[in-house]
Image (cartoon, coloured by chain):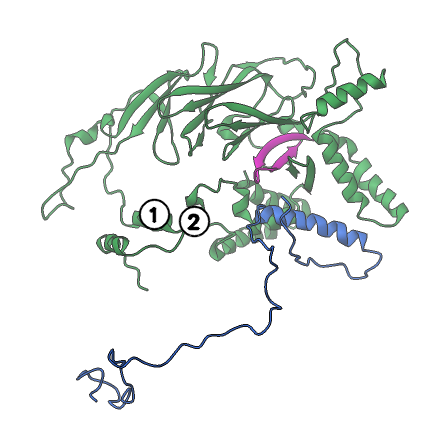
Chain colours: A blue, B green
Amino acid sequence: MGSMLGNLPSFDPHNFSQLRPSDPSNPSKMVPSTYRPTHSRTLPPPDQVIATEAKNILIRNIYQRAEEKLRSKRAATEHLIPEHGCKQTRPSTS
Amino acid sequence: MFKTNNVTSRIFERQIRTPAPGTSVHSARRFYENLVPSFTIYDVECPDHSFFKFTDDGQYFVCFSRNRQDLIVYRPTWLSFSCKGEDCDNNQELPPQVKRFESFFTQLYVKPLASCNELICKDFFLYMESNQFGIFATSTAQIQDARGTDGAILGVPSFEKITIHLFRLEDGFKLDEKVFHNDCVNLTHNMGAFLYDDLLAVVSLRYQTIHILQIRDSGNLVDVRAIGAYCREDDELFINSSSQLAGNRGDLVDNGTNHDQPNSNNSFLSGIKQRLLSFIFREIWSEETDQTQRVQCLKKKFYFHFQDYVDLVILKVQFLDRHHLLIKFGSVDVGASRNTDQLPAFFAVYNMETTEIVAFYQNAADELYLLFERFCDHFHATSINSMYMNFISSHSNNIHALEQLKSMKNKATSISQDSARHDNALLDTISSIVF
């Protein structure tokens, strides 16, 4: 069959020579593959609600630092290395 | 994706392409790259008012009369004309209407604002964009030799009457007002007030109270709370009733009516002062675990400076969100002066709902500076409704602006090796941008 590009100049005329453009009278038999989960370990809990945190990031940060200070000082006798700020997800408290 | 600068192709692009979600304001503002002023008109005869300000949405132009008693509002209606022909750019002929003030502004109304012995504060104006409400202030002259009354601190001037007026700018209808008697509110450049959405915070310097007012859609100014001597609404009732039960208590003067304002004679500190001192105490207490070290630490850091902490006064306030306030404390000498930014300042974050101090920063703490460097946009608390604020470059969202800030800070701190001056340099950077 003729090149798909017709007579346009091309780098290598044999490129795309194997390609058969889809013909409406002969529909392709290819079906897109679907993927189904094999387990339900990663399903979200049924009562999960995702909402935007009402407190803005500055306020969140201020509260976080205050709590870290309190936590690290209380645990000062137990741990030799002070706790560095670890981010924990917590439900919206406002 | 090539972005063109040509205004015609930009208009075509606007017709055929939807901008990225949430950036419609930004796309519209980009047109200002193509529309630049090309003419200046001199010697236009203007009415004899003191011109003050355009509102942020460009709908109104606010002026005050020369005697500072009346409010005059104009609607900006820019003159437009078109030129047809080949040589339009070089054609300097403008229509004759251009020389008239009335071609650009239409007067909407003149309303008396201040009564006979009052003057309008010509630096004070807050605008509520959602309802097109404007907030103005008038005050009487300063009282010389202000007597110290119950609850008032000394060293702050007193004004017989300060009024905050709420106007509907569309038609100049006065909606409501809030009056402060024998008080001092720093009105220059809106320093003593902060508007956030529909909440207005006004700092009464003399009585050391933060008044939170809500502006309702109906136009009423509603008192929400007054933070100062009392934190919760029922504090006053509680303190009055418990002091009655306690009977004679040392320094309380029983005049028949219970004056329970905590002044310097009263050893009972209540309200926000109590919250602040107990927060500082608990912070220092939890720094050390060893009992004797704790007491030493407290002596050095708390009790030694106790009177200084007690003498701190509220200077400025701003909202961080609907429930949190950032309060600036300082010494009373700077209470009414203009240039408060050079002197030691303390910042506290206060939660109005739980009435707790969340954080306290002493005098240009590095922690506050770091927070400010990373979250500067949130210090300029604006309502979520103003879309254009999403696109303002600041050093928290733009690496080039951050570089500039860091180099400014390094220059300031490298010159001054002394740690006190380092603090001042830090404070300069913070104060220049916070508030």
Q: Position of residue B411 (x, y in %)?
A: 56, 52
- The disc numbered 1 marks a residue on which chain? B
What amino acid does circle 2 point to?
A: Phe
Write down the residue under mark 2.
B391
What amino acid does circle 1 point to?
A: Arg
Q: Is residue B34 above or below residue B149?
A: below
Residue A94 appears in view:
yes
- Which residue is the extreme one toward the right? B292
Q: Position of residue B71 (x, y in %)?
A: 38, 20
Q: Is residue B242 above or below residue A45?
A: above
B16 vs B421, left or right, is left
Mark 1 vs mark 2, CA separation in Å? 10 Å
A93 vs B347, nearest the viewer:
A93
Q: Residue at x 48, y 10 (%)?
A: B117
What range is drawn magenta here? Answer: B312-330
Q: Residue at x 23, y 39 (%)?
A: B39
Q: Position of residue B113 (x, y in %)?
A: 42, 16
- The disc numbered 2 marks a residue on which chain? B
Q: Tell me the SS state at disc 2.
A: helix
Label of residue B29 in the image:
1
